Amino acid sequence: MEDCKKIWNELSIGISNNISTISYDMWFSSLEPLTVAYNKLIIVAKLKSTKQAIYKNYRDLILAEIKKLNYSYINDFVIITPDEISVYENQIQEDKVQFENDVDNIDSKSLFNSDFTFDKFVVGQSNQVVYAAAKAIANQPGTMHNPLFIYGGVGLGKTHIMNAIGNEILKTNKKAKIIYCTTEQFVNDYIDSIKNNKDNEQNRKFREKYRNVDILMIDDVQFLAGKTGTQEALFHTFNDLYQFKKQIVLSSDRHPKELTFLEERLQSRFASGLTVDISTPDLETRIAILQKKAFYKNFNLPIEVVYFIAEKIDSNIRELEGALQKVIFYCQLLGKEADNIDIIKEALKDDIDVTTHILSMDTIVDATCSYFNVKKQDIIGKKKLKQIVMARQIAIYLIYDMMGVPLATIGSYFGGKDHTTIIYARDKIEELIKTDNLVNNQVKDIRNMIQKQ
């Protein structure tokens, strides 16, 4: 146990040096080491959600820090919840093979993250094709789009869509045999199978594990670089599964044609089915993602705050979710609502540039009022003078176009106008921009004023 605590203390230092204090306090401060068994550090998390979040966001970091520690008898970790402790303690007393098999069984209960479903996957222009393909194979695995090869940058939703496929299949077929693993796990299993060339039993177990399945999903196949033996094993595994119409799903950070370090025959297999990409989500999709995530967390985010976060964090979904989690934690810590941009800026000060202009409905209306030389109370009120009506309609159009604010929210801002009035104003200006040079120039001028602030 002392060795276990020592390892965890050293590991914690390495982890804390690579993430923010808030993230460490949120996810790691409550963890406790249990023991070391069969090359794995067993860690206890009080909540299943903590376990899932760490597996999802920090697995690679933890494995990298374990490697740095250079303990020859530990190369992996397992997180369990308190209700699983007795299972592990009993199994540690049994023989090694049975223990590792049972560990696999326990982990398989949470093989797929229950939060990663199709219902919670926000569909936009950047991912609608991969969503449709994933839904199709989840409904009829092995009959179409085989293999499905998903590629895209870090944090864009590849892991979510693969988990969604698994969750959907298990929902209709609880007996489906599915393996979902990282390339690193596949490589490690292959290495274990060849440690002793005379141990045919280990080789047999490896083949049975990966070929006796209905669906095989492997994440991050770009990490096969330089691993010739593993590529050979995957090639034969692929052929065997494909021959028997078993579904194969692969993910990578690049298109199969760019995986030039792979054997040509394996590269060809990867590209033989349907290849789809996930690109960086546009602003509207990022807004929808934040709203949906906040809804499921039962956390209220005003549209101005949603827009602010979505505008500032445009790299990937993972960072967007991390920002939302940090905002929620920060607001709960202070006992405040997330309705003040200054609070949001403080919560995210380590993640975003907070010095630039914040776009809001007030900003757009103020710029429009300044341009037309009208008063704000008139433009959001009921006055019907021609110049005020035109200014009001342009402001409505710009709010919708630049911020994607729901029609009902815009109507409420403009004195409780119903959505049909807002639609009329938006559509009228949209048409005038095409046919009236004066209106077109006015909209451009106001937009430039807003963007330069």
Image: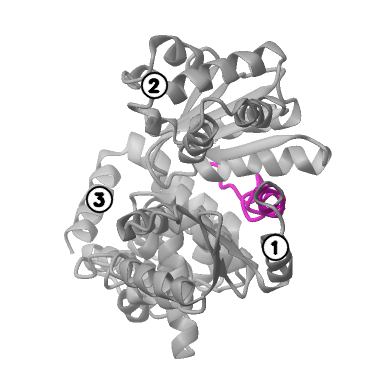
Q: Quadrant of residue 210?
A: top right
Query: Which callout, 1 or 3, points to the residue nearer the camera?
Result: 1
Q: Give the label on residue 228, or none.
A: 2
User: Any magenta on residue 65?
Assistant: no
Q: State the residue lying farthest toward the bottom.
A: 335
Tell me the magenta residue range: 99-123
The structure residue drawn at horizontal position 43% and vertical position 54%, both measured from the top left corner, is: 318
Task: Decide: few, some or many residues near mark 3? Use Cα within 10 Å; few <14, some 14-19, many ≥20.
Answer: some
Task: Decide: few, some or many residues near mark 1? Use Cα within 10 Å; few <14, some 14-19, many ≥20.
Answer: few
Instruction: Give the secondary structure at mark 3.
Output: helix
Tell me if residue 38 comes above or below residue 272 in the rendering.
Answer: below
Q: CA distance from mark 2 to mark 1?
A: 37 Å
Sequence-wise first label, 2 or 3: 2
Q: State the residue lying farthest toward the left.
A: 452
- The reply to whether callout 2 and callout 1 are in contact (CB within 8 Å) is no
The structure residue drawn at horizontal position 24% and vertical position 48%, both measured from the top left corner, is: 444
What amino acid is at disc 1? Gln
Q: State the residue lying farthest toward the front.
A: 198
Q: Which residue corresponds to mark 3?
A: 442
Instruction: Give the secondary structure at mark 2.
Output: helix
Q: Quadrant of residue 435?
A: top left
Query: Which callout, 2 or 1, points to the residue nearer the camera?
Result: 1
Residue 415 lies, in percent from the top left, at 51, 73
Residue 314 lies, in percent from the top left, at 34, 51
Sequence-wise first label, 1 or 3: 1
What amino acid is at disc 3? Gln
Q: Which residue corresponds to mark 1?
A: 93
Looking at the image, residue 120 sits to the left or right of residue 75; the answer is right
Viewer-proximal residue among 411 and 404: 404
